[in-house]
């Protein structure tokens, strides 16, 4: 990958060449219908945009030429300039120069453009002067009709002679200036035409635009190729062939896979930069003063991930202003600056992109959240009495919950935060909240950098392979039966000083409905039938600050998989998120840890 500046340069060149081609097409169309306002406005917008982009990138020559073309079309719009064959010829020449200047960014060639720029400037100047002369003539005629009686004929004659001499001098000076300008234009144009004799050629951009559906299709094909590769390697191992025979194939297919994945990545700043307006609008509605600070805009993430999370990020940003940042007068009383700050940042952690929304507002009061949740019937008072501070704060993501005292344009409807949570989980991410009352809050989203492949841990249960996303996996431990204890309807064990729930997946699969969890022995069946000294493979997972250890028959390996969604009616199975095909040809189901843990703890609220 190139530097950030190189990426911007490539993007500018691609867009500028599109503008150049579009101008050629629009000039041809306008020449056939010079009164077409829509085409005139379109040309004006393109030249204005090209000028602004070129100025931002520091390409002064392109900005200079686009600027004079923009000025011409401002006056065409206003009816000051009448389009004719001469002006069209000059516009075509100017656009040709634009194309050469854009190409010169890459080639480094020197391109003369001042001749055509000066010619358009003189043309524009003359048009404006003709307009002023016309207006002055109309004004003088009006004045003459109301002129007072002359004092003496002799004085009038003297004044008339003086005015005539002044007009002669002005005319001579103007003619001399025009001659000089025309001579300069002819000389410069002659030099530039000599330079450009060999330059009249079709220009192609180094970038191409590809529909996302084509990239998705290509990624699917690469996924199929990876599966076939693994199958080939696996079968060869069964027949005693050395797996090193396929090392080159593995390397090439892996490079191809990551190459296609890389094409799907876009800089996260593409979305982040849109939030300045969101912050401004919400702050205006709430009568608050807020600044947005962006960090890590160069971090890259899969376009599909960003598309899925865009609405969620908008909601989180709006919430930070509406619920987090205090009114200016309240901030001043607390000794804070009048203007609040919302920071939107991104960073890479292995194959995960962490997006954080931080505000220096009032923070979240977990006691107020708990009180409101009980009042709304979301949780029971018993749950509140035993739940931790973090668990109470996570109640803001429950469907229907709202901490707003009244419904406004921004908040109070009880819709939004649960959608954020669902969107995050749908792509294998998770969400966490850190808050200090009176100081502010941090909402952290851990998202996969790519949806094409995901890291997974494979295990076996009843001679069937399953997978769990690494993003939910905390550890793999081996426990004996005597360290696992029965507590009410479930099982508990100690992990790194924490008490965690233990679930035998066999028992979970035997349950036909959620109501079966209330049966006393529903989650004890396998536990009661194993030996006291038998070692158990436990996969420790976490979701929403809840830890659950799943007991499996055998742990296999860590592997990157291409997960496919299941079609109906299998997509209705809540504990399965998708499936993949392993190298041995077996279908491997991927467990939906977020849904499983959420379901297990749902009835405890």
Image (cartoon, rainbow, N blue to C red):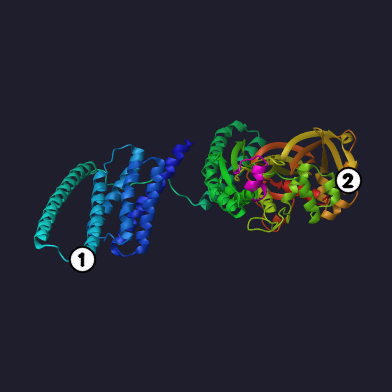
- Count of numbered badges drawn on the protein: 2
Q: Answer whether labels 1 and 2 touch (C-beta < 8 Å).
A: no
Front residue of 121 and 53: 121
State the image coordinates of residue 390 (x, y, percent, origin top left). 76, 42
Residue 181 visible, this orientation: yes
Choose top left, top right, bottom left or bottom right for residue 113.
top left
Does residue 115 appear left or right of residue 400 in this picture?
left
Looking at the rendered structure, the secondary structure element under dot 2 is helix
Residue 464 position (above or below residue 30): above
State the image coordinates of residue 523 (x, y, percent, origin top left). 86, 46
Judging by the rendered image, the residue that carries numbered circle 1 is 141
Marker disc for residue 133: none
Mark before the other along the chain sequence, 1 or 2: 1
Depth check, mark 1 against mark 2: the one in front is: 1
Residue 442 visible, this orientation: no
Q: CA distance from mark 1 to mark 2?
A: 108 Å
Marker disc for residue 525: 2
Residue at image point 68% right, 36% down: 558
Residue at image point 57% right, 49% down: 279
State the image coordinates of residue 443 (x, y, percent, origin top left). 67, 43
Q: Is residue 329 magenta?
A: yes
Choose top left, top right, bottom left or bottom right for residue 347.
top right
Front residue of 445 and 63: 63
State the image coordinates of residue 156 (x, y, percent, origin top left). 12, 60
Q: Which residues are magenta?
A: 322-341
């Amino acid at each position: 990958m190139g530097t950030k500046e190189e990426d911007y340069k490539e993007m500018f060149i691609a867009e500028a060449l599109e503008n150049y081609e579009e101008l050629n097409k629009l000039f041809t169309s306008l020449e056939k219908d010079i009164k077409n306002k829509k085409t005139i406005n379109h040309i004006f917008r393109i030249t204005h945009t090209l000028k602004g982009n070129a100025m931002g990138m520091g390409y002064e020559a392109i900005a200079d030429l686009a600027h004079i073309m923009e000025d011409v079309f401002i006056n065409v719009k206003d009816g000051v300039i009448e389009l004719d064959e001469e002006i069209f010829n000059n516009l075509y020449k100017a656009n040709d120069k634009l194309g050469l200047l854009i190409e010169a960014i890459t080639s480094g060639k020197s391109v003369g453009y001042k001749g055509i720029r000066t010619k358009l400037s003189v043309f524009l100047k003359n048009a404006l002067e003709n307009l002023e002369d016309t207006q002055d003539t109309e004004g003088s005629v009006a004045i003459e009709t109301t002129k007072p009686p002359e004092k003496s004929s002799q004085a009038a004659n003297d004044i008339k002679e003086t005015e005539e001499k002044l007009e002669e001098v002005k005319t001579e000076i103007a003619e001399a200036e025009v001659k000089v300008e025309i001579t300069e234009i002819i000389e410069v144009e002659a030099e530039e035409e000599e330079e450009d004799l060999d330059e009249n050629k079709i220009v192609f951009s180094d970038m191409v635009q590809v529909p996302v559906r084509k990239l998705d299709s290509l990624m699917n094909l690469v996924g199929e190729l990876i599966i076939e590769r693994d199958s080939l390697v696996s079968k060869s191992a069964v027949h005693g062939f050395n797996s090193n025979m396929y090392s080159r194939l593995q390397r090439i297919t892996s490079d191809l896979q990551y190459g296609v994945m890389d094409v799907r990545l876009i800089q996260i700043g593409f979305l982040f930069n849109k939030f300045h307006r969101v912050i401004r609008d919400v702050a205006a509605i709430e009568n608050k003063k807020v600044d947005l600070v962006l960090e890590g805009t160069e971090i890259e993430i899969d376009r599909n991930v960003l598309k899925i999370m865009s609405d969620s990020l908008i909601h989180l940003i709006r919430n930070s202003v509406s619920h987090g940042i205090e009114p200016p007068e309240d901030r001043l009383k607390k000794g804070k600056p009048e203007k609040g700050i919302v920071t939107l940042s991104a960073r890479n952690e292995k194959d995960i992109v962490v997006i954080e929304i931080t505000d220096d507002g009032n923070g979240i009061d977990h006691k107020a959240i708990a009180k409101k949740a009980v009042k709304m019937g979301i949780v029971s008072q018993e749950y509140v009495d035993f739940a931790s501070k973090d668990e109470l704060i996570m109640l803001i993501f429950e469907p229907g919950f709202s901490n707003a005292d009244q419904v406004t344009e921004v908040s109070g409807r009880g819709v939004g935060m649960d959608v954020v949570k669902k969107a995050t989980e749908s792509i294998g991410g998770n969400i966490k909240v850190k808050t200090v009352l009176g100081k502010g809050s941090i909402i952290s989203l851990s998202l996969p950098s790519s949806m094409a492949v995901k890291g997974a841990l494979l295990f076996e249960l009843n001679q069937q392979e399953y997978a769990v996303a690494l993003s939910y996996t905390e550890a793999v431990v081996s426990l004996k039966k005597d360290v696992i204890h029965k507590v009410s309807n479930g099982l508990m064990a100690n992990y790194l000083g924490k008490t965690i729930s233990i679930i035998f997946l066999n028992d979970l699969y035997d349950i036909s409905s959620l109501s079966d969890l209330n049966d006393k022995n529903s989650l004890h069946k396998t536990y009661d039938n194993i030996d006291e000294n038998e070692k158990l493979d436990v996969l420790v997972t976490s979701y929403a600050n809840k830890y659950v250890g799943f007991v499996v028959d055998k742990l296999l390996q860590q592997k990157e998989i291409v997960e496919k969604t299941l079609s109906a009616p299998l997509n209705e199975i809540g504990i399965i998120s998708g499936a993949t095909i392993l190298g041995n040809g077996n279908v491997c189901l991927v467990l939906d840890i977020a849904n499983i843990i959420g379901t297990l703890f749902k009835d405890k609220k």
